[in-house]
């Protein structure tokens, strides 16, 4: 009669279910890594394509709207579509204005603790899932170059907040309908939801929680910080949800603005 092992020695790169099986799990553990690879790959392909388009990123006064794609905001070059310029102009940049700014939101996402866990598992199989053998025999963690660079995440957090402020400004401007006054269109709703999801993604960030709750031996002595820490801590548990929702919606926002700007869709006025 076979004896049941009560403990399994963990060996990096070793088989969890014996020499012929990488795991004893019988559930569909592979769904999560497959979904992660699919969504992240689709996002990278779409955002790269959109960033190089250099057109159809702004819907302006000629159709009584003020809608800008989040991939192009703030528009900083001297060849921005009329009406979309952020005011500060960088002269002589020959490429798409999106390429000037995307490094910041992209760096924030790439170095995110949650995404790191997800793409290490999904792309590098390190490990593919809980209780599934690693695809690699060794593990150096994030202690060496290049992965030690992931520690810049807390700095990207500050840039993320800066971009949230700008996208919130864009969302407020979307209530404006040049020549008609103020109102709400589908585009207004899209930009407001996008800014809200991005704020929730930033507020649930671990670096945000640490900013208010970390580095203090007696948090109770800092009433405001303690209060904010208490506010963001339960939200932090939802970080994964906001990470995916905001990623997908920011791409959908670009799609919407692009379709309206190119004349495929009409941005309907709600009231
Ligand atoms: S941990 Fe995900 S954005 Fe900071």
Image (spheres, rainbow, N blue to C red):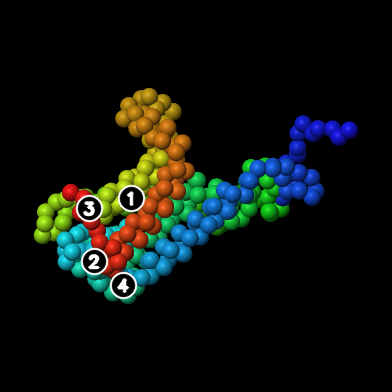
Task: Using the image, tell me which numbered label, if any, was put on residue 194.
Answer: 1
Residue plotted at (20% across, 54% down): 269
Give the mark toward the camera: 3 or 2. 3
State the mark number for residue 89: 2
Q: Residues within 10 Å of mark 4 (few under 14, many from 20)?
A: some
Precedes in sequence: disc 3 or disc 2: 2
User: Mark 3 and 4 residues: CB-CB less than 8 Å, in contact?
Assistant: no
The CA distance from mark 4 to mark 2 is 10 Å
x then y, percent, for residue 79: 25, 72
Does residue 9 appear left or right of residue 80 in this picture? right
Q: Could you tell me which residue is drawn at 48 percent across and 60 percent down? A: 42
Q: Residue at x 72, y 45 (%)?
A: 23
> Residue beneath label 4, please?
93
Q: Which of marks 3 and 4 is in front?
A: 3
Instruction: Check disc 1: other Cα within 10 Å, few if <14, some if 14-19, many if 20+.
Output: many
Say if 241 sits above or below 180 in the image: above
Q: Is residue 29 visible?
A: yes
**Label 4 beta carbon less than 8 Å to ligand 1:** no
Residue contact at pointers 3 and 2, CB within 8 angstroms: no
Which residue is the site of mark 3?
185
Label 1 and label 2: CA atoms lie apart by 25 Å
Q: What's the distance in space between the residues labelled 1 and 4, CA to CA?
A: 28 Å
* Above or below, comparing residue 239 to residue 262 in the picture: above
Between 205 and 60, the residue placed more toward the observer is 60
Pointers 1 and 3 in contact (C-beta within 8 Å): no
Depth-wise, is mark 1 or mark 2 nearer the camera?
Answer: 1
């Amino acid at each position: 009669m076979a004896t049941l092992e009560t403990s399994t020695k963990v060996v990096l790169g070793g088989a969890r279910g014996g020499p012929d099986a990488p795991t004893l799990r019988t559930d569909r553990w592979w769904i999560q890594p497959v979904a992660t690879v699919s969504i992240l790959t689709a996002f990278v392909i779409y955002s790269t394509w959109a960033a190089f388009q250099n057109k159809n990123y702004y819907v302006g006064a000629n159709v009584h709207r003020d809608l800008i794609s989040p991939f192009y905001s703030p528009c900083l070059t001297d060849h921005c579509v009329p009406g979309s310029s952020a005011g500060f102009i960088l002269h002589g940049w020959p490429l798409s204005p999106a390429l000037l700014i995307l490094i910041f939101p992209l760096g924030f996402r790439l170095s995110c603790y949650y995404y790191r866990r997800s793409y290490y598992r999904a792309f590098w199989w390190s490990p593919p899932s809980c209780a599934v053998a690693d695809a690699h025999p060794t593990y150096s963690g994030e202690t060496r170059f290049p992965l030690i660079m992931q520690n810049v995440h807390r700095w990207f957090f500050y840039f993320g907040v800066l971009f949230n402020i700008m996208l919130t400004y864009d969302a407020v401007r979307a209530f404006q309908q040049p020549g008609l006054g103020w109102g709400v269109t589908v585009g207004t709703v899209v930009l407001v939801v996008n800014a809200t999801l991005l704020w929730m993604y930033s507020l649930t960030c671990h670096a945000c929680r640490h900013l208010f709750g970390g580095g203090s031996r007696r948090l109770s002595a800092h009433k405001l910080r303690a209060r904010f820490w208490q506010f963001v801590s339960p939200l932090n548990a939802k970080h994964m949800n906001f990470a995916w929702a905001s990623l997908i919606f920011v791409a959908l926002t670009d799609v919407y603005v692009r379709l309206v700007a190119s004349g495929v869709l009409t941005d309907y006025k709600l009231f």
